[in-house]
Image (spheres, rainbow, N blue to C red):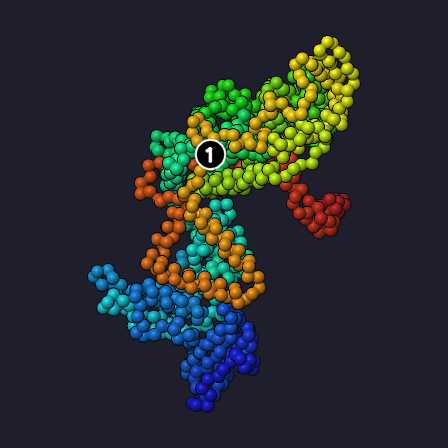
Amino acid sequence: MGDGEVDDLLIGDDKRDDLQMGDGDSDDSMIGDSDSDDLMIGDGDRDDLQIRGGDDIQMDLTVQTHGGQNKQRVKIIFSPGKTRSYLPICEPDMKPYIGQRFPTLHDGIEFYRRYGAICGFDVRLGTQRKDRYGRITLKYVYCHREGEKHSVAKKPPTDAETSKSARRLASKRSGCKAFILLRINSGSTYFVKKFEEHHSHALCSERYKHFLKANRHMNPGHQRFLMNCARVNMGPLKSYRLYKEFVGGYSNVGCTSVEFKNFSRDLKAYGKGCDAQMLLTNLFEKRELSKAFYFDYDTDNNDHLTRLFWSDPIARRNYAAFGDVVSFDATYTTNRYNMIFAPFIGMDNHRRIVTFGAGLLSKEDTNSYSWLLEKFKHCMARSPHMIITDQDQGMKNAIERVLPETRHRYCMWHIEKKIGERVPFQLRSNKSFKKKIDAVIWSDLIEPDVFVKEWDKVLDEFNLKDHAWLGQIFDAREKWIPAYFRDYPLSGLFRTTSLSESVNSFFGRYLNKASNLVEFFMQYDGALEAQRHAQDVLNSETASSIPKMKTPLPFEKHAMEIYTKKIFLETQSEIAASCYTCRILSISNDGPCCAYKINDGINAEVFDVVYNSNEVDTKINAIPEKYILDRWTKNAIQKISFVDGIDVTDKDDPMAEKEMALSRLYSEFYHCVGLFDSDTGEINSFQLALKEYRESRSTIDKSLPTQSTKRRLFENFHRSEVPSVASILPPVPVYTKGSGKRIKSAAEIAMEISKKPLRLCKKCNKRTNHDSRNCDKFSGEATSSAS
C-alpha cells in the first residue's frame, strides 16, 4: 500500500456498496449501507484485497439508538501479515486513557465495563496483586475474548456414559489482547497504568448489544417487579414476558430471561433452612401489632415445625358473622414441604366463600386434626353449628372428640362425584339414571322414610341393589342426605356442595407447591386480599343499586332494604313465585283456624297450611324480625366489633405503610405516562428528569455493595432477616395419604383423550385416534394379502 494517497476511507453516510472485505459470499463481511443497525464486520481473508493509501481504514456507522441518531466509528487496522485489529471509537469522555484516576477500584472496573458496553464487547476480571495488608495494588481487566480455550484430554466414555448426551460448549475466546491495567496510587486511589484498545475480533453490532453481559443486569426496578410478581404466584418467565410488554420490546428490558430466573432462584434460596423461624417471627410481630391476630404452633422432639394455625382479625370477625356452617377440607398441598393445607371456609352474605382461618399439618391423623380443631375452637370462642368435610376417618374421629355439639356432615359434592365413578360403566352416561338418582339425593322436601323408599326404587330399577359402595354410602345417609337435615337450621347452606372444590380452585390460583413457608404465607395473604376485595365490590354494588320490584307488596321493598343484592334476588323470586305460581285448591274453617290446600306450581307439590288468626297477623308490611337472619343482611359484618372480648375491627398495619407509599408512586407514574399520549417532547423531558434522579441516587447507593443491596431487598420482601441461629427448624417433608401419582377416573381419562388433537392416518387419510400401524384398512389389506 502506498503512503499518503488515501488516509481515511469513510463508509456510512456516502452509502458505498462496492467495497468488500473478507469472503465475498459471507453476508456479514459486507460494508455498505450504513442505515442497517445490525452491521457486523466479518473476519474473511481476501488475498486479493487492494487498498491504496495508509494502513488505517476508518468507518462511520450510523445506527439508531434510543436517544436518536448516534454515529459509532470503528477503525480497522491491517498489518503486513494480513491480520486485522479493530479499534472502537467513541466519545472521548467515555474512553479510558493512561493516567486516568478513579476514587476506588470498583469505579475503574465499572468505567471500563461501560466503555465495553458502548463499543460492543464484554469485560472479564483478570490477574491481581495484593500488598501485605490485603489491598489490591494491581488489577488487570481484559476483553471477554482474551486468551485461548484450553483443550483437556478426555477419557473414552464408558457404556453408562455413552447414553448421556454431552453438552456442546462453544468458546468465545479468540486471543484478544485488549485490556486495561489499574494500579493503586499513594492516596488509595487508582489510575490507569496501561491501556490496550485494539481488539482481534469484530465488535458486537448495535442490534445485539443488549445481549452483552455489560448491558444485562437486574436493576432495582427489575428486582422489585419480579418480587411483586412472586407475591401473586407468577413465575420468572411469565414475569419477563409481562415486563417486556411494559417497556415495548425484548431489547428494552435490559436483561434476559436468564437473569430473571437466576434472581427468582436466589429469592427462593434466601432463608433456606430458616423459613420456619422467619415465618414465626413474622407471626409474632403481627400479634404485637394486633391482639386480635391469633396463631399457635407445635413442634416435634427435634424442634421441627409440625403444626400451625392462624387467623387474622378480619377472619375472626367474619366467623362471628358467618360461622354457623364451616367447610373443612385438608386435601390441598401448597408448599415445598408438602404440608397439608387445611383452610376453614364459610359463606358470606353474598353467598361467596369467606376464609375464617387456616392450618398447616405434617400428618393426616386424628391427633393432628384434633389439635387443629382445638386451636380453631379456642380462637373463635364458639363451635360452629355444622361442619362439612369429606369422608376422612381421621377428621370424623377428631370432630367427635373436639366438637361433640357440632353437627357433622359429609360434602355432597365428593359423594356425588364418586357415584359417577363407582357405578357400572354403562350407567355413567345414562341420563335417566342421573336424573332419578339426583332427584332422590338432592330433595330437601321429602321425609327420611320417603328417601329410603325412593332410593331402593332407583337401585332396583337399575339393578344396583348389591352394589357394595352404594350400600356403604347408604349406611352413612344421615351424614349427607338433605332429607335428614330438614329440621336443622342450615340457613339454606346445604346446597353448597362444591364449596371445597371452589376453595381448591381459588387458592390454587395464588399458592405454589414449590414455595417455602414465608412465600406461602405471603401468597395466602394475597389470596385473602383478593377474596376481601371481591367482597367489598359486592358490598358497594349492594349499597349503590336499587333492584326492580316484581310485586306491589310492601315486604318485598323491605327485603330489598335489609338484604344484600344476591339474597334479595333469591327472596324476590320466592315472593313472586308465591304470588304467580301458587294457587289455593281448598279452604276449610274451624273457629280461629283456617286450613288451606296450596298447590306449588313449580315443584308440583300440594301443601297443607294452617292459619290461626289468634297467633298470626296476616297484615304484614315488613318481614317479621324473628324471620330475619343477620348473616344475610347488608350490615351483618358491621354489627361485629368484639370476639371473646377482643376488638377485631380493622386496624392500619404500620408494616404496610411503605408498600402503600410505593403503590401510590407506581399509580402516579403510570398516570403521568398516560397523560403524555404522543407528545415526544414531553416524553423526552420526563425521561430526562427520571434519568437525572436515578443518576443522583446511583451516586448515593455506590457506598453499598451489590450483595448488601440484594440482601436488603430480600429482607424487605420476606419482612424478616435470616436468623443467625434457628430455634424452630423447617418441617420434615410430608408423605401424604394416597398414591404419589393421582389415580384418574375413567371419565376424566376419556375427557383428556377427547381434548387431544386427532392424528392424520396415512392409510385412510383421515384424522382419527389411530395411525397407519393400527388402521383397520391396513389390517384388512394385510389379511387379504396373506390369504
Q: Where is residue 42 in the image (x, y as percent from the top left)?
A: 49, 74
Q: Quadrant of residue 174?
A: bottom left
Residue type at mark 1 is Thr
Q: Of residues 748 and 311, which is closer to you in this image?
A: 311
Instruction: Decide if residue 736 is in sight here.
Output: no
Q: Position of residue 197 (x, y in %)?
A: 38, 74
Q: In which quarter of the image is the N terminus?
A: bottom left
Instruction: Decide if residue 230 is in sight here.
Output: yes
Rendered residue at 46%/36% (across/down): 650
Q: In which quarter of the image is the C terminus?
A: top right
Depicted 338 relative to depicted 609: above or below: below
Depicted 163 relative to depicted 279: above or below: below
Q: Of residues 195 and 322, which is closer to you in this image?
A: 322
Q: Quadrant of residue 411?
A: top right
Rendered residue at 35%/30% (across/down): 301
In the rendered structure, the answer to whether residue 728 lies left or right of residue 621 reads left
Would you call the spot at circle 1 few (<14 residues within 10 Å), some (14-19), or many (20 or more)?
A: some
In the rendered structure, the answer to whether residue 145 lies left or right of residue 190 reads right
Q: Where is residue 259 in the image (x, y as percent from the top left)?
A: 45, 56
In the rendered structure, the answer to whether residue 516 lies left or right of residue 761 reads left
Rendered residue at 53%/22% (across/down): 385
Q: Of residues 264 and 223, which is closer to you in this image?
A: 223
Please name the residue that numbered disc 1 is placed on.
649
Q: Position of residue 653 (x, y in %)?
A: 42, 41
In the rendered structure, the answer to whether residue 121 lies left or right of residue 194 reads right
